[in-house]
Image: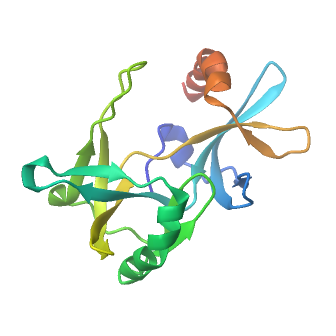
Amino acid sequence: MFPSPFPEENDRAHAGSITLTDDTGRSLECYIEHSLSVDDQEYVLLLPVDSPIEIFAWQGEDEEEEAVLVDDDAIINQIFGTAQAVLAEQNLIVKNSAYALTVAGDLPPVEESELFTLEIEDEEAELEPEQLQLLANFFHEDQEYAIYTPLDPLLFFARMSSTGQPELLSPEEFRKVQPLLEEHLFNEVE
């Protein structure tokens, strides 16, 4: 699995696991990487148990070819069976989980030749390029697709409700509490 950005957490067993559920009822099992309390509110940093994947469609010709992230549920549903079959050859089980597609199983070792760097353009923030490892290519109705897994961990930040259920923070909520949370997290890590 991916390394935690908090080294002390990897030195001992995960504090437990919790399930995130989206609006459609899909679930995503996550390890609780870190838990902290800020102003009487409990927050948790979550790492999915299974590895996240992203599917890209290759569009264009030769040097003009570019990878376009497939995030349309209708297209994902059309190609899901083919993606499952291709990854099953590597003993990976594809899951249409809440908030991300994931695979269960042991990922192949990282090979430099199989890495793809995704430049993320965002006018509001300078974002680091994301490195992805190629898992498989396949065709569906004459369209080429590629399945990648990010090298950096996919982390979720949630607040615990009064009923003990995790609630993901909206981007606006996260921006408001981010400085407090970072201060608490890094103080606890030291």
Left/right placement of residue 139 relative to residue 125 reads left
Image coordinates for residue 110, horizontal then vertical, percent: 26, 60
Going by the picture, which residue comes out furthest to the right?
163
Q: Quadrant of the C terminus?
A: top right
Q: Nearer the viewer, residue 9 or 117?
A: 117
Number of numbered discs present? 0
What residue is drawn where x is 45% and y is 77%?
84
Q: Quadrant of the N terminus?
A: bottom left
Left/right placement of residue 123 relative to residue 51 reads left
Going by the picture, which residue comes out furthest to the left?
63
Image coordinates for residue 140, horizontal then vertical, percent: 34, 74
Query: In this picture, is 54 found above or below 76?
Result: above
Res. 181 in view: no
Query: In this picture, is 125 found above or below 19?
Result: above
Res. 161 in view: yes
Image coordinates for residue 116, horizontal then vertical, percent: 23, 51
Q: Report the coloring of the rendering.
A: rainbow
Residue 167 sits in which quadrant? Answer: top right
Query: In this picture, is 169 found above or below 27?
Result: above
What residue is drawn where x is 54% and y is 55%?
100
What residue is drawn where x is 47% and y is 63%?
75
Image coordinates for residue 91, horizontal then vertical, percent: 41, 81
What residue is drawn where x is 33% and y is 30%?
121
